[in-house]
Amino acid sequence: MKTKPSARSAPGSAVPAPERAGRPRSERAHQAILTAARELLIEKGFAEMRLEHVAARAGVGKATIYRRWPSKEALAQELLSQLAAPHIAVAESGNTREELLAAVTNPMRALTETDFGPVIKAMLAQIASNPAIGDPFRATVVAARRAEVARVIQRGIARGICVRMRTLRSRPSCWSDPCTSG
């Protein structure tokens, strides 16, 4: 069986995906499933969301969902990552104060002005108590946010604006992760 990098794997990822014979997967169906999952999470919460309901709302078969995600946790994780991604990066402006302010206001806007807010609200208990959701969330969304805040601080240090910290790991975890203590 031939392998090639997955279209869904991260750039530079070494995770091979089997080359598929036949019709390629529909991006439209993929987005319809994510939209249906988002709507159901907001309406019913994670515990009440059923993949058969997601499939019906998306207009696809349940098998279509399972070909893309092995579980509803994996589907919820992709949805969280997709909704969070546009709000993590802080554009380099040359002004450390503006960048630090953006590091705080970007996630606040995501929570109050986008679908990320209601979805994360529906998922918070699961993130805190279910390792199948919490661990990947912390490894992707939270880690990306922490790394971006660290880059902003490093740029401030390079500009001579921020005082060099003994270590960026010494910062309180509440700066970037209200869901965990570490």
Image (tube, grey):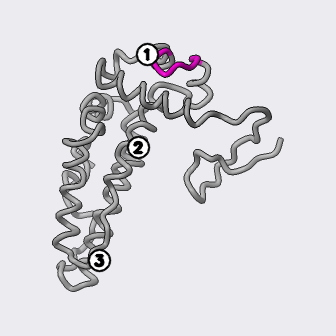
Q: Residue at x 20, y 66 (%)?
A: 100
- Name the N-terminal-most of marks 2 and 3: 2
- Name the N-terminal-most of marks 2 and 1: 1
Labels in figure, total? 3
Q: Residue at x 34, y 18 (%)?
A: 47
Q: Amino acid under label 3?
A: Arg
Q: Is residue 151 left or right of residue 70?
A: left
x, y percentage for residue 91?
Answer: 31, 67
Task: Give the quarter of the image for residue 29.
Answer: top right
x, y percentage for residue 17?
Answer: 69, 43
Task: Give the quarter of the image for residue 175.
Answer: bottom left
Q: Residue at x 55, y 33 (%)?
A: 28
Q: Is residue 136 left or right of residue 60?
A: left
Q: Amino acid under label 1?
A: Arg
Q: How far is mark 2 from mark 3, CA to CA?
A: 25 Å
Q: Are marks 3 and 1 in contact (CB under 8 Å)?
A: no
Q: Which residue is mark 3?
A: 155
Q: Amino acid under label 2?
A: Ser
Task: Give the quarter of the image for residue 73.
Answer: top left
Q: Are marks 2 and 3 in contact (CB under 8 Å)?
A: no
Which label sits on residue 81?
A: 2
Residue 120 lies within the magenta run: no
Which stretch is magenta?
56-62
Q: Residue at x 18, y 70 (%)?
A: 98
SS at circle 2: helix
- Badge 1 density bin: few <14, some 14–19, many ≥20, Cα 10 Å: some
The front one of 75 and 166 is: 75
Q: Is residue 48 left or right of residue 70?
A: left
SS at circle 1: loop
- Name the N-terminal-most of marks 3 and 1: 1
Which label sits on residue 50?
A: 1
